[in-house]
Amino acid sequence: MKKETANMWLVLALLSAVFAALTSILAKVGIQGVDSNVGTAIRTLVVFFMACGMALLCGAKFSPSAISARTWVFLVLSGLATGASWLCYFKALQLGDVSRVAPVDKMSIVFTIVLAVVFLHEELTLKAAAGGALIALGTLLMAL
């Protein structure tokens, strides 16, 4: 693997974090005066069309029959989890301060570490455990 692309995951993950931060701020302003579920629906439509546009732009080939049943099941379950997360997040943003809601939402990192160890059998390193513990502690300090 070329060195330029070896760390591309890190660049993309950092961009994801920046866009997630913007999402919180823009959503808080955007859901004023509208039901949080309607706001989530609008956001979901935008994401849907953006993702379809990117797939077309990148020339991705889509053949539903070429995708295994297992892949379909897990992608649908992932979509349902994403939808539930977004619905809860938008309602939380409507009810609470962004500076408190966003850190609690990032507890997903801790839950992800635990679920990756339990279900994907990933190794729980001392570094990951310590980082997860610090995230949990930081979340408590910011949310309370």
Image: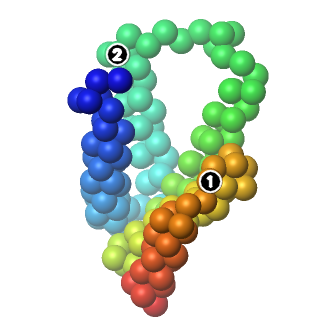
Q: Quadrant of residue 56?
A: top left
Rendered location of residue 4, percent (x, y): 23, 29
Q: Quadrant of residue 9?
A: top left
Any mark on residue 58, and which? 2
Residue visible at 41% across and 29% down in the picture: 51
Give the amino acid type for the residue marked by disc 1 in the picture: Glu
Residue 66: image x %, image y %? 66, 10
Say which of 135 and 43 sits in front.
Answer: 135
Mark 1 or 2, which is nearer the eye? 1
Q: Residue at x 51, y 63 (%)?
A: 128
In which quarter of the view is residue 72 placed? top right
Local packing at callout 2 (Cα closer than 10 Å; few below 14, some 14-19, many 20+) is: few
* Above or below, comparing residue 28 to residue 9 in the picture: below
- Where 59 falls versus 108 (above or below)? above
Outermost front residue: 126
In the picture, measured across the screen, residue 76 lies left or right of residue 37, that is right
Label 1 vs 2, first from the N-terminus: 2
Q: Is residue 63 above or below residue 93?
A: above
Disc 1 from disc 2: Cα separation: 34 Å
- Residue 63, x across and y down, in percent: 59, 9
* Residue at image coords 49%, 47%: 41
Residue 93 visible in the shown view: no
Q: Which residue does the numbered mark 1 point to in the structure image?
A: 123
**Badge count:** 2
- Position of residue 114 measured from the top left corner of the image (x, y, whole percent): 64, 61
Q: Amino acid at mark 2?
A: Cys
Identified at 33% across, 54% down, the residue is 17
